[in-house]
Image (spheres, rainbow, N blue to C red):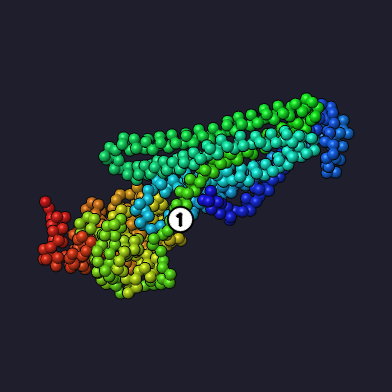
Amino acid sequence: MREYIRFLKFLRPHIWVLLGALICMIISSAFNGISLSMIIPLVDNILTGGKILISSGIKIPQFLLKMIDIINSLPKDKLLNRMIIFLIFIFSIKEVFTFFQTFYMNELGQRVLRDVRSKIYKKILELSHDFYSKAHTGELVSRITYDAGVIVNSITEGLTDLLLQPIQLVIYFIVFLGVKTYFGISWKLTIVTLGLFPLVAIPVIQIGRRLRKLSRSTQEEMAEVNSVLFETIAGFSVIKAFLMESHLFKRFQLHNTRFYKIWMKSIKRMTGINPITELAGVMSMAIVLWFGGQEVVKGILSPGAFIAFVASLLALIKPFKRLSRLYGINLQAQAAIMRVFNILDRSTSITDRVGTVELKKFNSDIRFEGVHFGYNGREVLKGIDLRVSNGEIIAIVGTSGVGKTTLVNLIPRFYDVTKGSIKIDGIDIRDISLKSLREKIGLVSQETILFNDTVVSNISFGKENVDLETVTRAARIANAHDFIIRLPKGYDTVIGERGFNLSGGERQRIAIARAVFKDPPILIFDEATSQLDTESERLIQDAIDRLVKNRTTFVIAHRLSTIAKADRIIVLDDGRIAEEGTHSELMQKGGLYKKLYELQFLPV
């Protein structure tokens, strides 16, 4: 319950919408109470032809006495006409306020849904690479879509009942006590009536406890369904190539069926609440009718007063039933709320320190001083010492998994070193603001990340109101302009999700154009040409050659065309720098670099 109360803080910015709904609830419930009181003159005056009788010795407000006198003095036909007009009036007013109550609560729910999704998405953007290395895409999407939707349902429906039903309980209880007090309802009948209410609540509480566990399982299975779905879409080509359709379908079917079974168990229990409470209500009514009916037959109690008493009892049972159902809804919401807060409460491992400085310009060098890095108990980098001067091109080579990408990922602080330091112009990068640090770094990776937007937007990513001439200049440097102008809408062509409508070489050239447009003093190329055909590699290598001029560049590559032009080559082995020098120097040494070269570049 603590999580649910905490979640209600999301309502604070929209308190006026909630207050508007609350006012409408009070007014519509008050008119419901007034309509119940109309039963007494309808039965006692019109249907039985008698008069409304007040229990003797009871003090009654003067306005109520005058109203009863007026009703008793009117002929039956005139009283019937006035009652019909009055009923139409009060029900019209009630329905107007019921409409606004429902509208305001739905608006409140949608506002909170918007805020929750935005907050989760903002948090996801803030989280560091270590979080994404463990998280599942489908699970994160499930938090924003399914879990947030469950929570909002608890607001539009659950919170409505949480506010409305207690208001109705109070109003109906006032009517109940009024009928009991002014029309001679015995204490015996009243005590029997009130003693029956636990029959409605107890079975629902028992069902609700099971619902909470089922709800958590439901949300976990939905996350699995989403995860398989996203993996399928992302790896569609591989699935087709390896004929994995049947395997993936079975996996999806497994989680989909599990979700169905758990969801049906929840539905069975949720739908079971209504007949159980109905049965309890009927049993309660049967007992009340037996006790009260005897008093009507004996002439102790007027028919109108007894029917009004029974009607107020029925009105009281309805809010109890709704509140009982609310118990199940809120238990489902609590499981979703816990999953949402599991994301929102995560701390970001890479943050700005107190008193960070702005890196206004890169002037001198980048230094790795005794850098160690590891994760999951495994040390990847071990005591890296390296100085890279401004404008120098450094190639980093080594066997797969040796830590090449990890090394360059430490520069923009995707991860922080576990020991040692990296300094730019003598300043520890942890003392530089993340924004100013990353503004100075451009990244082109092997896995080209493009977005389902126009070519212009992908090249000028993150910038608004860009100059097309500047974008075009960047595209020309990246050897991308010629193929871009052949696209259906040129620079305004939407390239599809992950650049699906482009070839691998075209995607990579747009990624290089994006780096050109950013114009950073530090560049990182992470195997940017490793999966391209010869012609695409030539165009991209030409673009890279133009881009790296007067920039400090780190290149992770396997191909000689890139490595040979580096000012210096760093050879990593077992997390350490094993060799260092130019291509010709390292070949003459006959060490690890020469072995890698012969394995990778010499014909078999």
Residue found 74% across the figure and 40% down from its top: 177
Residue count near mark 1 (Cα–Cα under 10 Å), binned few <14, some 14–19, many ≥20: few
| Amino acid type indicated by mark 1 | Asp
Q: Up-down: is 430 above or below 380?
A: below
- The residue that mark 1 highlights is 345
Quadrant location of residue 458? bottom left
Q: Can residue 461 be seen in this view?
A: no
Residue found 35% across the figure and 52% down from its top: 134
Q: Nearer the viewer, residue 118 or 29?
A: 29
Q: What element carries label 1?
A: loop
Does residue 199 appear to the left or right of 482 in the view shown?
A: right
Q: Nearer the viewer, residue 343 or 444?
A: 343
Residue found 77% across the figure and 28% down from its top: 295
Q: Position of residue 246 (x, y in %)?
A: 31, 35
Q: Which of 502 and 438 is in front in this view?
A: 438
Quick one: which residue is furthest to the right in this view? 73
Q: Which of 219 and 594 is in front in this view?
A: 219
Q: Position of residue 64 (x, y in %)?
A: 83, 41
Q: Where is residue 400 in the image (x, y as percent from the top left)?
A: 22, 55
Quick one: which residue is furthest to the front in this view? 188
Quadrant location of residue 584? bottom left
Does residue 43 appear to the left or right of 282 in the view shown?
A: right
Q: Where is residue 222 in the image (x, y as percent from the top left)?
A: 43, 41
Q: Is residue 591 visible?
A: yes
